[in-house]
Amino acid sequence: MRKKAREITDEDFYALNIKKMWQYFKGESFAFWMICAYLGFEYVRPQSIIPAIDILPWTQLVVIGAILGCFTDKTVRWVSSSVNVLLILFLLIILLSSVLAYFPSASYRNLDKYYLWVVIYFLIINIVNTRKRFFIFICIFLVASFKISFSLALTWAQRGFSFTSWGLSGPPGFFQNSGELAIQMLVFWPIAWAFAHSLKPYVSKWWYRALMLMPITAIMVILGASSRGGQLALIVQLLVMNHRAVFRPKVLISMAVAFSLIWTFLPDEQKERFQSMGEDKTSRQRLLYWENGIDMIKENPLLGVGYFNFVPYFAMYYPEDVIVSKVELPHNIFIQVGTDAGVIGFSVFLLLLLTAYRKSAKFKPDGCTKEVALVGKFTNLSLTGFIIAGQFVTVTYYPFLWIHLALLVSMMNSFNKSR
């Protein structure tokens, strides 16, 4: 079986030869099977869709399986990256912040919300360590996201592209809320668009059209999710995507048509939400979170008020500024990190984002066509979507950034070494 797998070329993968890809996958290691299964259980959530199989902690089991599999996979080698150092440093800062927090118990209860992503990150970058492994892994990521975008785009179309207060809801888990769902689509569609265009020279027209459904349905979900932050991030992504040619007449006309279509598809109720930004109760509460969150950082500059201490601290010291039913997280990734880990933690977090941008911008894979390299270039567009939308929701410890970093480092390691 290993002999057959070695005969399969990169071009077979680029042509989406499913039979040969499956043949290669069957001959892969147990560790790789498990890390691929993790992505399926985390993103597709079959255990939530089919209650009959929801009898075991599947996600935890496949992660344990991947860890054990590393000991038998002889290809697994430690992958060095500056991202590794920053992730570990951020973890140490969070641990210190938890010990010195105003409410340490709140910190300890939530430690797994970050350290588990560190574990997942290191598993991915060390197991997904060849071009073929990375191609299969990114395909699973895209198909899992497309499963969500396609079904929800159909749902929105079937209800006549109408507005609902809850927008669109994803599967139970990280993407169930419309705001978080929109961010997953913001992360997904640029990579899907680049993936489709990078494979265009290798696949049939019908395959290419099918691949283009991924970014199209993702954008539809962003529009239907009723998330103002997500829709604003989409506009920024489109502007960044075309920034070099934005003043060309053809591009200007295309972008004008695109923005007109986006505005046309938005229900009247959603347009009214944009017009009331800053005035409705939700907006006013978020402004209070941000204003007082900045004060928290100023008063506790080194390590903040404590990891996941924003809610109890706000409830105790700013009760007069709670205008909704209960105190929530700050609805801003920078405020969350600043209050969780102070200026020290925020600096490391910001350096992490800048490092990701720099690595992606300089990505030049060995022995690959410029079309294949396109996927690497568009990871920055995904990161931009996360950052812009993250100014309106609290998603620092959701999978978006940490899986993105794992994909980026894994891609660079896999493509910049011998096959």
Image: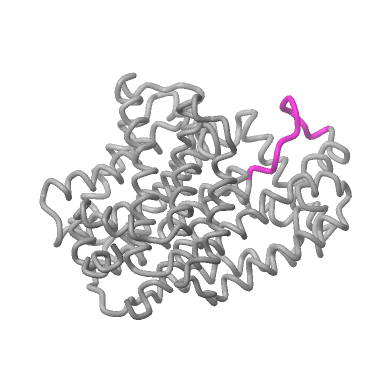
Q: Is residue 275 visible?
A: no
Q: Is residue 5 visible?
A: yes
Q: Name the residue located 66 percent from the left edge and 39 percent from the top edge.
A: 286
Quadrant occupied by the N terminus: bottom left
Residue 308 location (% of width, % of height): 76, 47
Residue farthest along the left direction in this orientation: 205
For the residue pair 395 and 260, the one nearer the viewer reads as 395
Magenta span of residues? 320-331
Quadrant occupied by the C terminus: bottom left
Q: Name the residue located 35 percent from the left edge and 66 percent from the top edge.
A: 377
Determine whether 290 is above or below 161 in the image: below
Residue 389 location (% of width, % of height): 51, 47
Residue 156 location (% of width, % of height): 35, 26
Q: Name the residue located 38 percent from the left edge and 43 percent from the top edge.
A: 144
Q: What is the quadrant of residue 354 in the picture?
A: bottom right
Q: What is the quadrant of residue 6 in the picture?
A: bottom left
Residue 321 lies in the magenta stretch? yes
Q: Name the residue located 50 percent from the left edge and 25 percent from the top edge.
A: 51
